[in-house]
Each structure stands twice: as structure tokens, then as C-alpha cells.
Image (cartoon, rainbow, N blue to C red):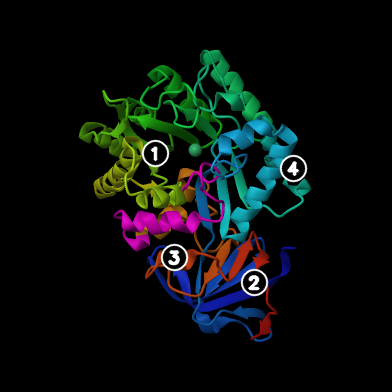
Amino acid sequence: MANSTPIWIRSHNVWNERAGRFEAAALRVEDDKIVAVAQHGEVPDGAELTDFGDDYVMPGLLNTHVHLDFSGSQTPLKDFESEDPAERLLRAAGNAHRLLMSGCTTARDCGSHWTTLALARRPDLSPVPLPRLLLSGPPITVPRGHLHFMHGVVRDDGDIIAHIDRLQREGGTSVKCMVSGGQMTPGSKPEDTVFEQPSLDLMTAESRRRSLPSVAHVLATESVRRAALARFDSLEHCAFFERLPNGLINRNYDDEVALVLRDSGSAMMANLSTAMPFLEHLRTIEAPTDVQANALRQFDKMIDNFGKLVRLGIPMVCGNDAGVNETPFDSTWLEVVWMIKAGQAPVDALRSATIGAARALLIDNHVGRLEKGYSADLIVLRGNPLDDAANLKSPAFVMARGTVYVGGQTAGHA
Ligand SMILES: [Zn+2]
């Protein structure tokens, strides 16, 4: 239950987003909000206080790209196809709960079945506590396009408006479009761009008019260019994919398109840590096949491209495609680790997983900082995440909207 009587939380290391460092402070939480940030010693006598000593208090993580309907197993598509909508809804609630318990207090679903929008309409009915969820429902896609089996197929601009109307009516709070093909959908070609510019412009204009964040799946180079020109709030993957004559997919970084992306002001989600166990397994194979060797080569290129795009100043946001192949829902922290390995400064990577992500989701006026008026979403870590982002794993304490879900301890008195 949220606290109606104010409580105080303090530590010598509380995240100050504007300064980009941890410093001594005390937070006053009332109901679901932070109502004051005070000096460490300013907690009034007799107040209900949880003192975290030198532990690190920061905003709960945001994961801008998950698929709640997917199992995260080695065969997520097979699992999806074998389950009916009711079973998928149960899976989605469980997956969302795992996000919350791992310290991710806000998540955006980037593609699920229509039925899963029930979680947005009636979170109060969920058998398990949920993080703040933004749901995209079925992604807008073309006939036989990427994730068409989620039933977001459109044939013309009229269909696009009808789709967004229905999405909003059924509780959707984000508009997702598959601007290129995808790797997971049989028959869909990731190197192909499938929407024309006017349709993409229509999607972002409609999203903006309704104050919904827009998000574009872009693997093909031309799809990155068009989605950037349409100014989607967030561009996913930005893989610069091309198909080589030998049939293999290749990342061919395009300097000009990278500049179009930079000038768009759009954020980018790179999901560097997706399918990490699979890649680790590939590295142990002594004589990999061409396809396996290419997968490892493309991973290295992805890391390299991320560094180039960071240096261009493109705002990166944290997301890991949780739910797809071997990508569990408690591994948001691993994405932050890889964003740093691939070239982000630790302070910027923390922002990518908090205020930066909130900005791409259009909720940065109340989520992503520990400030007066902000949602009381916070996690407490034993070690400094700026020294090692792996300290984000398994937080000792998780509070979401003023309610404690992990590490509830008896409050002391000041
Ligand atoms: Zn995805």
C-alpha cells in the first residue's frame, strides 16, 4: 500500500540527476510521490525514517522495449504460437512483475497481442504487482510483415488512423511501427523498408496529436532514414542492415543516415545485450558455421556502431527486447553494462536508463528523477553503479509509486 503518512528515506548517496552524481540527501515520500528533497540532516524529529547509510539510492530503471507476451526462451515464437490469448495475458502479467522485482519500475511493451492491453486498462485486476506500463499493443505492420500475427496489419492510411483509434480506446499508450522487416518473423526481410514516408509522417502526427510516444522498428538503413525524417520519438535497433550476395545479413554503417538520425532529435534504443547467452554459446564453438561466425561479427559491428552514434551525440535509451530469444525480464541492468562497454560514459548510461528513457516515453515531467513532484520510484544498491553498472543487478530495495516491493524493512525513527 502507498503511504498516506509521509516517510523519509535518506542516504549519503542519493542520485542528483542534474549534477550527475550521488550525494547526501533525504527524500520525503507521501502517497506515491516525492514531495521534498532535503539535506541529509534535515529529517524532523520523530519522523518515520528509513536510513540507507552509504547505499546508493537512484530512480527505478526504465526499460523502453520489452515484449510481455514472449517467453524469453530459446523458442519464443513457438511458445507464442502455442498459447491462446488468455495464456499470453497470464504470461505478460508474470513478465511485467519480474521487471518490477528486478528494479525496473517502468517498462514499455513494444509489441503484444490486443488482449494484453487489458493490463493497461485494469492493472488493479492483476494477480501480481506491476510496474508502470506503457503498452503499444500490436505493432503497425504490413500484410505478412514483422509480427503480423499480433494483428496490427494496415493496408492504407485509413487503416493507420483506425488502428491508432482502437489502440487508444483499448488502453494503449504508445504507437509502434515496424518500418522494416524483422528477423523473428518467417518470410519478413529485415533489409527491406516497408512503409512510405507519408504514412510514417501520418503515424507520428497522429501520435503527437494524442500525446502518445511513437516508436519505430528500423533494421534496414532506408528505414532508419525515413523514421528519422518522420521524427519518431524513439528508433529501435538502427542496424543499417543490408543483404550480402552470399545471403548473409550485414551491418553497413551509413554516415549520411547517421547524421539524419542525429538531426531528427529522436532517441535510439540499441538493445546490445539481447540474446547474450546465445552469443556466449557461439563463442565456445571451435569451428562455427558461416552463419554463426557472421552473428559474432555482426555483434562486434553493433558495438562499434553504437560507439560512433554515441560520439555523434544521439540520445540513447535503455531497452533490451526482453522476451525475445534468451532475453529474460530481470536483465535490464545488463543493457546498462553493455551501453558503457560500447562507449557511453557511466553517468550518461544511468541517464539512458532513467530520465533519458522517460523523455522518449514523454513522461519525464514526473518519472526518472528523485525530485519534488516526481513519482516515488526508486531502487537502492549496495555498490556504486557509476563504478560498475553490474551493481544495478538485484537491488536491495525497490519502491514503485510509493509502495515497497523489495527489501521492506522496519522503519526507524529520526
Ligand atoms: Zn522488439
Q: Earlier in the sequence, mark 1 or mark 3?
A: 1
Q: Few, some or many C-alpha atoms within 10 Å of disc 4 (few <14, some 14-19, many ≥20)?
A: few
Q: Quadrant of the N terminus?
A: bottom right
Residue 7 position in % (x across, y down): 66, 73
Quick one: SS at disc 3?
A: helix
The region drawn magenta spans 318-347
Q: CA distance from mark 1 to mark 3?
A: 23 Å
Q: CA distance from mark 2 to mark 3?
A: 19 Å
Residue 126 position in % (x across, y down): 75, 48
Quick one: SS at disc 2?
A: loop
Quick one: SS at disc 4?
A: loop
Residue 349 at least partly seen = yes
Q: Amino acid at mark 2?
A: Gly
Q: Main secondary structure of the magenta part?
A: loop
Q: Amino acid at mark 3?
A: Ala
| Nearest to the observer: residue 121 or residue 245 | 245
Determine whether label 2 and label 1 are within 8 Å by CB.
no
Numbered marks: total: 4
Q: Few, some or many C-alpha atoms within 10 Å of disc 2 (few <14, some 14-19, many ≥20)?
A: few
Mark 2 = which residue? 407
Q: Which mark is residue 122?
A: 4
Q: Amino acid at mark 1?
A: His
Q: Nearer the viewer, mark 3 or mark 4?
A: 3
Q: Earlier in the sequence, mark 1 or mark 4?
A: 4
Q: Which mark is residue 237?
A: 1
